[in-house]
């Protein structure tokens, strides 16, 4: 019998530890990504200036560029700048927005991309997806998977705890996303990639049961590893399907209707709990316990939204991904019915 297999794209380098930024040059050389340290460094306007001196010392042969907000226009500006450079790779250093701009621009310029995450707010650090704003709307764009993923736990620990909580919400949401994927398969025959499902679930379960305080090195390491696995699950699936379902539709809808409400992962966390409530999931109690333990947003008021506003966002959520079938599309609740479900949800979990 023939042995059938497939080739899976994964990062060549994954390093999660304290002090990772101190020897960037040696790390890139040892992994053969850039033996000479000739890379295009891309930082944001937030943490970038503070890290700049250390980056110059670690990578004296690098060229540095600063980017602003995560928009298609900014990514195109960076792409144009990168096309004029002869470098081994693009090294994005910062949070999700900076990494998404650098990832998309590197893809368009035909250059390998290395993601150096300074926070763990969402699973974009190792995903083949860049979320960029265009015409006032956030959209997901395909991009090459990072060739390397680095996380400095010292920088993560020094950042806002809300970023860690956001990452918890985004990772645990895999359970809801997978349930939506399996629902779509049962209703419309949508193909489900079993390996992608296994990876997405494994990442979520690791965070769900991880010991240690939210800010402990043990927990942060588990969260970082799970975010990398989630990104790879999307690469295996060829889409964000294993990590994005009704929970993300709700978050995108909140962004559209009530911009600036909260971090992506915080909105996804509430969307996850609500979607799990709608489907009466057996994971509901463990998800709620995890969110309580780590102080993650659970109900609309944790986001600064009223029940009415959240119901409006949940009702409009399917329009954010017309090609995706989730529990929201399956139930097809009108606004009145959605309000009733949201009120029941809040009554059950707002304590």
Image: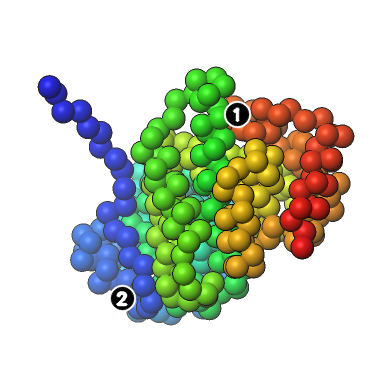
Horizontal side of residue 24 vs 29, given as left or right: right
To which quarter of the image does residue 191 belong? top left
Kind of element beneath mark 1: loop
**Residue 206 visible, this angle:** yes
Query: What number is the disc on residue 299?
Result: none
Decide: is 163 above or below 87.
below
Horizontal side of residue 90 vs 322, given as left or right: left
Colour mode?
rainbow
For the residue carrying disc 1, how many other residues have a C-alpha within 10 Å: few (<14), some (14-19), or many (20+)? many
Kind of element beneath mark 2: helix
Q: Position of residue 143 (x, y in %)?
A: 44, 42
Q: Residue at x 25, y 58 (%)?
A: 33
Decide: is 278 above or below 40.
above
Horizontal side of residue 9 vs 297, given as left or right: left
Q: Quadrant of the C terminus?
A: bottom right
Query: What number is the disc on residue 23?
Result: 2
The residue carrying mark 1 is 325
To which quarter of the image does residue 14 belong? bottom left
For the residue carrying disc 2, how many other residues have a C-alpha within 10 Å: few (<14), some (14-19), or many (20+)? some
Which marked residue is nearer to the observer: mark 1 or mark 2?
Answer: 1
Q: Position of residue 4 (x, y in %)?
A: 20, 28
To which quarter of the image does residue 320 belong? top right
Q: Position of residue 175 (x, y in %)?
A: 53, 46
Say which of 170 and 36 sits in front.
170
Q: Residue at x 71, y 29 (%)?
A: 331
Q: How far separated are the C-alphas under marks 1 and 2? A: 45 Å
Say which of 92 and 164 sits in front.
164
Q: Quadrant of the N terminus?
A: top left
């Amino acid at each position: 019998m023939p042995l059938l297999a497939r080739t899976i794209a994964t990062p060549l380098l994954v390093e999660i530890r304290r002090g990772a930024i101190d020897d960037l040059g040696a790390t890139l050389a040892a992994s053969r990504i850039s033996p000479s340290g000739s890379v295009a460094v891309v930082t944001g306007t937030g943490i970038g200036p503070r890290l700049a001196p250390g980056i110059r010392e670690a990578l004296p042969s690098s060229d540095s560029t600063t980017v602003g907000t995560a928009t298609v226009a900014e990514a195109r500006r960076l792409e144009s700048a990168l096309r004029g450079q002869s470098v081994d790779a693009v090294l994005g250093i910062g949070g999700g927005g900076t990494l998404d701009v650098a990832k998309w621009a590197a893809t368009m310029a035909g250059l390998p991309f290395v993601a150096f995450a300074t926070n763990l707010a969402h699973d974009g650090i190792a995903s083949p997806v860049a979320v960029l704003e265009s015409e006032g709307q956030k959209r997901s764009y395909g991009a090459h998977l990072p060739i390397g993923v680095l996380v400095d736990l010292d920088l993560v620990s020094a950042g806002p705890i809300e970023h860690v909580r956001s990452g918890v919400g985004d990772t645990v949401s895999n359970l809801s996303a997978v349930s939506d994927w399996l629902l779509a398969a049962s209703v419309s025959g949508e193909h489900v990639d079993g390996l992608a499902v296994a990876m997405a679930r494994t990442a979520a379960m690791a965070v769900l049961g991880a010991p240690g305080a939210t800010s402990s090195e043990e927990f942060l390491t588990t969260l970082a590893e799970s975010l990398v696995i989630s990104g790879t699950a999307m690469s295996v699936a060829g889409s964000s399907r294993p990590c994005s379902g009704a929970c993300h539709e709700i978050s995108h809808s909140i962004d559209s209707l009530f911009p600036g409400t909260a971090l992506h992962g915080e909105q996804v966390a509430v969307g996850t709990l609500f979607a799990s409530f709608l489907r009466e999931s057996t994971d509901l109690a463990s998800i709620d316990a995890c969110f309580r333990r780590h102080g993650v947003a659970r109900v609309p008021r944790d986001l600064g939204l009223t029940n009415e506003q959240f119901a409006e966002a949940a009702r409009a959520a399917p329009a954010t991904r017309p090609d995706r079938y989730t529990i929201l599309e399956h139930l097809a609740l009108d606004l009145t019915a959605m309000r009733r479900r949201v009120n029941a949800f809040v009554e059950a979990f707002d304590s």
